[in-house]
Structures are given as C-alpha cells and as structure tokens.
Image (spheres, rainbow, N blue to C red):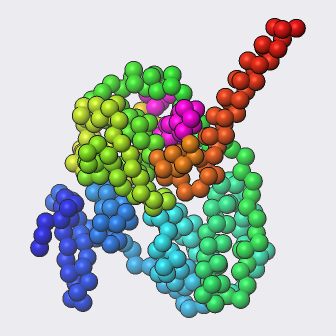
Amino acid sequence: MPKARYPRCYKFPSRSGTVRWYVRRANGPKVRVYGDYGTPEFEANYLAVMAGALGEKPRPKTGKQGTLRWLAEMWKQSSDWAQTSPATQKQRENILLHVLKSAGDADYTRFKEADIRAGRERRKDTPAAANNFLKTMKALYKWAKENDLVDVDPAKDVKMLRVKTGGFPPWTLDEVAQFRARWALGTRERLALEILLNTGLRRGDAVRLGRQHVKDGLATFRAEKTNVTLYIPIAPALQAAIDAGPTGDLTYIATAKGLPMVKEGFGNWFRQACDAAGVKKSAHGLRKLAATVLGETSGSELELQALFGWVTNEQSGVYTREANKRRLALQAAMKLQAGLEQK
C-alpha cells in the first residue's frame, strides 16, 4: 500500500472492494474519514478528525417511507446534497436535526405553506436562524418537487425575514497595529492574524492552509464555501510570520500541540486573542478590512472576486461601490471648496 499523503491516514479495502480511509490518532482507535480521497470534503473531515472533533459517523435513523425523516434521508443521499459545500451540509444537518426531532414521523406530503411559515415565525426572534431554517426547507422541498415526490412545494412562496445588520464590523489599520504590538512574530496569534489579513480567507479556509498548498510562492486550493479555486500569493509579511512560526505539520494554523484546528474552535480562540489585545473584533472582520483596502486602491470587482472567492458581483460590488462613493465625495468636496473660494 503506498504511503498516504496525509499523515497517519491509511486505506483499507472492504470485502466488496470499496476503499475506506482511516486515521489513527496517537495510540487511540482508528477513526473513519468520510469523502473521496483528496477532495475538499475529505480534507475537511481529515483535519477535523486530527483535531479530535469527530468520531465514527453515526448511522442515520432512516424512518418509515413517507415520513419527513425518510424524505430528509433520501435528500442527503442525492446528488443535490452532495454538490453543496461541507459547511452548507453541516448547517443543514443541524437544522434538520431539530426539525426532525419534533416532526420527523409526520407525513411530509401533508405540510402546507402555513406550516412552513409557522416554523419561520417560531424563530422570528433570531431572524438569521429563521432564514436558515427557511433556506433548508426550500432546498428540501424544491428537490422533492423536482423528483416528483410532492405535487406542491409548500416552502416556495414563504418569504425570508428582513435582517437589519451590518454583519461583522471590519478592522481598522490602527487595530491591526494594536494587535501586532500585543502579539509579536513567533506567536500563534500573530501568525493567524497575518494569514487572515494577507489572504482575505474565511476562517474555514484559513485553518486549512498549509505548505502542501503552496508552490513557488503561490497558494492554490478550493474554497470550502463556494468550491471555487483560489490563487493567493504569499506576501512578504505573511512569509515572515510563517517563517517565525510556530506552525503545524499540515496546516500553518495549529493548536499548541501542533494539531489542525476546526473553524469553530479557531474562531473562539482568535476572539480571545483579540480581547487580550484590546481589539473587540472577529476573524471575519479582517477579511472585510482586506476587501475594503483593495476596493479603496482601485481593485476591480473581478479582482475582488478572484482573491476572495466570490462568484457574483453582489458582494464584490459592496466594496467597489463604497470606494467609488468615497472618491466621488472627496472630489465633490474639493470642487465645492474651490467654488466657495471664488465667491
């Protein structure tokens, strides 16, 4: 058997000839890694196992045919489900877990638009959660309709709730300097900041970045959320932080023991580092700062999309429009001042 590219990862063919991959952590039992070898899904599961976040995948409770639980399990075995990102699958799994706990044994064909709307309303105090519930139900019943499992899609016309939020606030350059003053080169915290700031990666991608992705100073890998290929030059400031370390074997960002981190644990850990530096911001705020700086230095929408992994103009346009408004406002103010001086 050839040596696996991932440390402590071994393949074991089943009696039917199916290849299964396992990881043996230290002296513990071997743990199954799910997904096709080398895919983003496989890598994400591998890193999670190495970080101690996953055990054996539980066997699904299939449910009686015709129930909502059965419909959900059929959906999760479909190509429609397989084509979504691991992050989206995880979010939908969590939502379905709560929905099936109360309505899993109900006949899925009997749900009406009013039932879906009622589910949204029960979550109205947290609009983002209500909308995520609604997105999942819309995706489930759209798939069911396309596969002739229902005659009417009960979620199709249920509207999303308005969410009034600016999202995570972007960092300022002063806050970056403040963080750097607290966490010097040679600390895990400083390395994490430089990766987030100099790449613009989401935290789920930042914790996956490692030496195996870099060749001739260019990092190349697929974004977890959108599955688009990212090409990220390793800037001098980032290279200096990588050289100073400490890094893990497979990922630059690692635990104190050198093991990969999962994005949720990383987010909590990095927020604590921010608090220690007196910066009340999050990891995602650095991505926003990077996008803002690029937009203000005449970065085009296509450039923003290429670097940040966006697939539409909706997000990249936010930063280019804001930068253009700022430039136009400054030009207008200068013309106003000149006009006033002539009077």
Q: Is 296 within the magenta?
A: yes
Whether residue 67 is visible here, answered yes or no, is no
Which sits in the foreground, 160 or 286?
286
Which sits in the foreground, 262 or 209?
209
If the image is split into quadrants, where does the N terminus sit?
bottom left
Residue 149, compared with residue 257, is above or below; it is below
Query: Which portion, as a residue range, is magenta?
Result: 274-299
Q: What secondary structure prevails in the magenta region? A: helix
Which sits in the foreground, 329 or 92?
329
Q: Residue at x 49, y 59 (%)?
A: 226
Q: Quadrant of residue 170?
A: top right
Residue 251 x %, y %: 29, 48
Residue 38 x %, y %: 30, 66
Residue 323 x %, y %: 63, 34
Q: Quadrant of residue 20?
A: bottom left
Q: Residue at x 48, y 50 (%)?
A: 306
Residue lying at the far right in this picture: please name it: 343
Residue 309 x %, y %: 49, 52
Which sits in the foreground, 197 or 81?
197
**Left or right relative to 139: residue 341:** right
If the image is split into quadrants, where does the C terminus sit?
top right
**Left or right relative to 335: residue 213:** left
Q: Residue at x 39, y 20 (%)?
A: 181
Residue lying at the far front in this picture: please name it: 342
